[in-house]
Image (cartoon, rainbow, N blue to C red):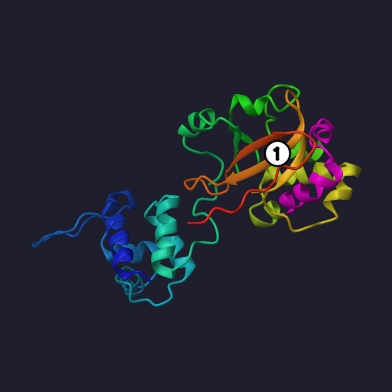
Amino acid sequence: MNRAALRALLTERRAAIDPVTHGLSRPTGSGRRAPGLSQEQVAYLLGRTRRAYQELEAGTCSTPSVDLLREVAQLYRMNEHEWIALHRYALGEDPSGPLDADSGYQVAGAWQQTVDAMGEMAYLTDRSWNLLAANEQCGGLFPAGRVPENTMRWMLLNPEAREVLTDWATAWAPKVFPQLRSALSNRPDATLRALEADVLADPVARHHYEAKGAFIHPDGDQRPLAHAKLGPGWVTMCSAIPEGSPGARLMILLFHPGDRRHPPRRPLRA
């Protein structure tokens, strides 16, 4: 636990909350009054004892519950960065999930410019693989000249994908279908459930989906690919998550033409 950092974060966020927005008012009387909610008002709004919150803010609660941290973060309208910081300061680890249930469905607008600036094929999807941004280079990969609206649906169910993704049944399917299963186990939504229903209704897709597997992300993997403009080759995939939107995915595709796998590069180390 980082008591000083925890205390600074909580007092700063508490001071930013106007009691009037919760139907409360600042106490009146002599003496200096700090802005924002009082600790007693926080405890009242959380439905907890004043001591429980005081110990959290002071850093004297050795193992605060995740439920308490989440309640405080929601009351203080923390963003995902602050939520992660709160978890690290209080428990010494990252949270198991985002604060906002809608996190991962949108990213900062600057990401489109970021993706456009990349010289390699790149695209960005939300947590359900719905396309958020893509550059021109990535559009050239597909026969239609544009990135599909949902990249996972395209990979799993579109007949075109079984031509573009070389050796689809052996090189791609065993690693792509488990990603859908993993996403459904973690944070299911209507898009993912509908996709699973369509996969189960497709005999070929269902066969691969029921084979299970534990592959959950493609970062660093290399697979054969038939580029619509550049012909056959291999693609090395690099994936990342925008820190402000846990669940969204940035994919950068490094294409190497030819029928041989590109020699792997040594890991980067400081």
Residue 180 lies in the magenta stretch: yes
Q: Secondary structure at mark 1?
A: strand
Majority secondary structure in the magenta region: helix
Left of 31 or right of it: where is 97? right
Along the viewing direction, whichever of 97 and 254 lies nearer the viewer: 254
Residue 176 lies in the magenta stretch: yes
41 is higher (above) or lower (below) than 226: below
Q: Residues within 10 Å of mark 1 (few under 14, many from 20)?
A: many
How many numbered circles are shown?
A: 1
The boundaries of the magenta stretch are 158-181
Residue 97 location (% of width, % of height): 55, 57
128 is higher (above) or lower (below) than 86: above
Residue 2 location (% of width, % of height): 35, 69
| Residue type (three-letter) at the residue carrying disc 1 | Val
Q: Quadrant of the N terminus?
A: bottom left
Q: Is residue 19 visible?
A: yes
Residue ID at (68%, 44%): 190
Residue ID at (28%, 65%): 39
168 is higher (above) or lower (below) than 109: below
Residue 161 location (% of width, % of height): 80, 34
Residue ID at (61%, 24%): 136
